[in-house]
Image: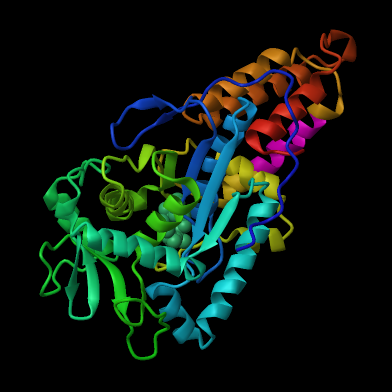
Amino acid sequence: MRAWPAPEMPALPVPGPDVALHDTATGRRVSTAGDGAATLYVCGITPYDATHMGHAATYVAFDLLNRAWRNAGREVVYAQNVTDVDDPLLERATKVGVDWRELAERETELFRADMTALRVLPPEHYTGAVESIPLVVDLIERLQRAGAVYRVEDDLYFSVASDSAFGTESNLTREQMLAIFPERGGDPDRPGKKDPLDCLVWRAERPGEPSWPSPWGPGRPGWHVECAAIALDHLGVGLTVQGGGSDLIFPHHEMCAGHVHVAEPGSTFAQVYSHTGMVAYDGEKMSKSKGNLVFVSALRNSEIDPMAIRLVLLRHHYRSDWEWTDDQLFDAVDTLSTWRKALALRSGAPADPVAEEVLAAIADDLDAPRAVAAIQAWVDETLGHGHLADHSDQDAAATISAVLDAALGLKL
Ligand code: 5CA
Ligand code: ZN
């Protein structure tokens, strides 16, 4: 599948530091330094509605990581999926009376435009579930050969007992898993399952639903096996970072890891499991199913500067849960206008230490609020001095503009 056009990213004169990232599995801060390319898999959208601020926050967070690696001189290979066939997409298509393929293509195209406006670097591999069905079939066959798959009627399930590391990504108790599983697409009560936590890998054709041929008859992929197959195909095992929102910690990322561990015995799916906090609106997690949404495209259509949207997102640490309010957006618009005033002076307060602090903050578990504070301090100092003679750094604006763009994705 086609991704979106890459924004230009200026090369910085001094390389940034190696990146450390909080790992969900161990609860520790882990260095992502290493030889060879850094590999990143981030769970993509289910394209049945437009990109909301929760999605945008998640993709901007991993964009900071992508940029930090590149600024540190690291090669990056990034893969992202599109869940372009799944229950919620099919249900929405039926409800609004459009073909599910048309709905998926329309919303994916809107997502591309939103990511372009927010200056998010595109993945090297942007891959749909539908185009990956042969990969999924291949992975299920491998799981089957390992004895990890069984039938319930005509559907196929993955046995979580077959992965000895099951549970080590989320670190949840069995009771916690059983409580969350049905809220996130699981079916613990289905008769015939060996363990209530076992997950669907192949769903046999149902009347009126799309299906593809397979060795087990016509059907379509389960959700977790889709991401496992795409990540494995493009990035292999031991990827540097597996990412997504914290709503994917369980079951999604636990199951993806389980599939890969069983298909590639002795492997580790990811070195770091990284999760973003949830963005709320009107007191609840912003979600397509609840409908409490602020769309990136709606703000773009009302002539809001996408860089102001990006600044609102950067002002929250990626791991915290927070609530979107329109006031934060208006405040970001005002802030950017002050920043632009300072940059228009060209010379200003010394910029090199600021650029260094921005790179250090982002390399330190993507601390964007700290980076934004460093820029704000430079702007205050530069504007506060009043006349040019006080400004010791003749190239300050160029240095600050470059680091804003390269590290934070803010082109002003
Ligand atoms: N297609 C699956 C992943 S394979 C999916 O979860 N799609 S999604 O459209 O529901 O979400 C896309 C991405 O945005 C996921 O990484 C998800 O964790 C993240 N996300 C969804 N809602 C929020 C929210 N309110 N705040 C932050 N991130 C969110
Ligand atoms: Zn996924």
Identify whether 207 is placed above or below 372.
below
Quadrant of the rendered structure where residue 183 is? Answer: bottom left
Report whether 26 appears left or right of 352: left
Pick the quarter of the image with the N terminus: bottom right
The verdict on residue 334 being magenta is yes
Q: Majority secondary structure of the magenta segment?
A: helix
What is the magenta range? Answer: 331-341
Residue 65 appears in the rendering: yes
Identify whether 250 is placed above or below 198.
above
Identify whether 47 is placed above or below 170.
below
Residue at 69%, 59% in the rendered image: 300
The verdict on residue 160 being magenta is no
Quadrant of the rendered structure where residue 268 is? Answer: top left
Q: Position of residue 172 (x, y in %)?
A: 19, 44
Report whether 312 appears left or right of 260: right
Q: 216 or 319: which is nearer to us?
A: 216
Report whether 6 appears left or right of 83: right
Q: 321 or 38: which is nearer to us?
A: 38
**Ligand 2 location (quadrant):** bottom left
Identify whether 212 is placed above or below 336.
below
Residue at 39%, 85% in the rendered image: 209
Q: Position of residue 53 (x, y in %)?
A: 53, 54
Residue 280 appears in the rendering: no
User: What's the colour scheme?
Assistant: rainbow
Q: Position of residue 246 (x, y in %)?
A: 36, 47
Q: Position of residue 54 (x, y in %)?
A: 49, 53
Pick the quarter of the image with the C terminus: top right
Residue at 18%, 55% in the rendered image: 160
